[in-house]
Amino acid sequence: MASNVSELTTYDAYLAGEWKKSSSGETIAIQSPYLHDTIGRVQAVTQDEVDQAIKAAHKAQKEWASLSLSERGVFLNRWADELVKNEQDIARSVMKEVGKGFKDSRKEVVRTADLIRYTVQEALHMHGESLRGDGFPGGPQKKLGIVERVPLGVVLAISPFNYPINLAASKIAPALMAGNGVIFKPATQGSISGIKMIEALDRAGLPKGLLSLTTGRGSVIGDYLVEHKGIDMISFTGGSKTGRHLSKQSVMIPLVLELGGKDPAIVCDDADMDVAVKSIMNGAFSYSGQRCTAIKRVLVNEKVADELVNRLKAEVEKLTIGSPEDDSTIVPLISDKSADFVQSLIDDALTKKATLVTGNKRERNLIYPTLLDHVTEDMDVAWIEPFGPVLPIIRVSSDEQAVEMANKSEYGLQASVFSQDIDRALEVAKEVEAGTVQINGRTERGPDHFPFLGVKASGMGVQGIHNSLVSMSRQRVTVMNLK
């Protein structure tokens, strides 16, 4: 699985059920975003190895699909047990590799085990149906349709860096329970964590060949995987730009995309300010805002804007800043490039006369939490997703203006509405173009069995345990012609 060379771990790829080094002879260095050093190396897999992995997955999938749901579930429940058993080790990998606090990294591992177990139970309770021919007006009386769900074949699961365990398993577990083979392509920054997760699955005894983990350079295997004729479905979580590219490259195969967001918090003039402040703080700044579901702008009624800004300022200045090893809320961003991008959005807003409430301090890729007031439509930060700890405040005069501003965005992942009048909150929520609207709570993914989706540039298709099982299978109808 891994070998130590000069105290630096070089991880093998998991190809057709075997841990091995790539025939390319090349590896990719993984840098820790807060240690600023290489923490390990992963294999640079070749296109030939991708071919072999997909061929093996198709071969193993046939036998896997012939197993009962209960038999498949045994392997997945063992996988969940292995993850919990190795919770500390996996959480340390997540912390070092993506800079997430250790406490939150442990939560991610445990949440993932729960997701896997729930996926097994959900699959066991998804029953087929039968249809009588005479159920349709004038239909034939002696036909009986039996409707079942069957696997698609081989699923390509592409996960992001920010939740390298949970968002990978949310694709892999339903794909396997639905009877598919899997090719798993983790984000390069997050691949060590992905390897640790697949080591646990391998220990659970998963049949050889059914799943392969392909680490490698996107320029070599990225498009090659997406366009490969042996891939029968793609589930991707990542940026909207990459999502658009994927949708153009993949032809005539099912595709589920979970992409970016510019999630607004709409604060009405009758909002419970305690609830709004707490929810906005948790939603905007946890893990330095490196979440697609983070609150990324506040649309606040001008009658309560001064109070909200003053209270947010006080809370922002209490945030812990530093190393994930200390469970700081604000940690270094995933890369210097990401920090440069966030800083450019702050600079653009200040150049265009936004008010700096607090923040705008930087130490390498550590951006201090930044609160900007009087943000206007001509500023990039009003529209562009930062994926960092910067929160723009946009003042509005009415609920209608807030909805208009929310809907002008190209994104539509989630939104929050804060009002003590439930009818008013529901009316605003109904008008917002988003996959999910939270009322009096922060934007967030989950619980994991809820449908999770985005509209516009925020995604295509629906995730969530039940919906993922549906998207990774298809209906098959057998018609009985009775005597």
Image (cartoon, grey):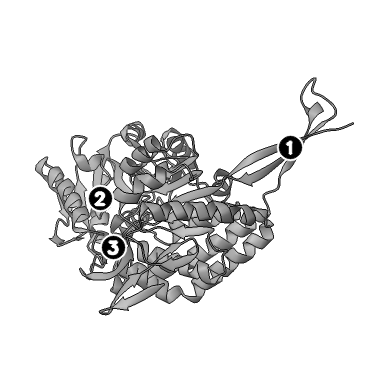
Q: Secondary structure at mark 1?
A: strand
In 3D space, how far apart are the residues under numbered discs 3 and 1 (Cα atoms)?
50 Å
Q: CA distance from mark 3 to mark 2?
A: 41 Å
Q: Do the CB atoms of the residues marked 3 and 1 lie less than 8 Å apart?
A: no
User: Which mark sits nearer the N-terminus, 1 or 2?
Assistant: 2
Which residue is the site of mark 2? 391
Q: Quadrant of the C terminus?
A: top right
Judged from this view, the residue extending furthest toward the bottom is: 7
- Tell me which corner region of the image, top left, top right, bottom left or bottom right, holds residue 381: top left
Dot 1: within a 10 Å radius of its alpha carbon, few (fewer than 14), some, or many (20 or more) residues?
few
Q: Is residue 455 left or right of residue 378?
A: right
Sort mark 2 into few (<14), some (14-19) or many (20+) by Cα contacts within 10 Å. many
Percent x, y for residue 388? 26, 54
Secondary structure, mark 2, is strand
Which residue corresponds to the image point at 67% horizontal and 54% vertical from the top-left? 66
| Residue that sits furthest to the top in the current view | 138
Q: Nearer the viewer, mark 3 or mark 1?
A: 3
Q: Quadrant of residue 383?
A: top left
- Residue closer to the observer: 352 or 194: 194
Disc 3 element: loop
Residue 239, given in percent of the width and then of the height, sits at 33, 46
Q: Position of residue 399 (x, y in %)?
A: 36, 35
Question: Comparing marks 3 and 2, which lies closer to the viewer?
Answer: 3
Name the N-terminal-most of marks 3 and 2. Answer: 3
Q: Is residue 341 left or right of residue 440?
A: left
In the rendering, at what x and y percent does residue 477 appear?
Answer: 70, 37
The residue under label 1 is: 478
Which residue is labeled 3 in the image?
A: 26
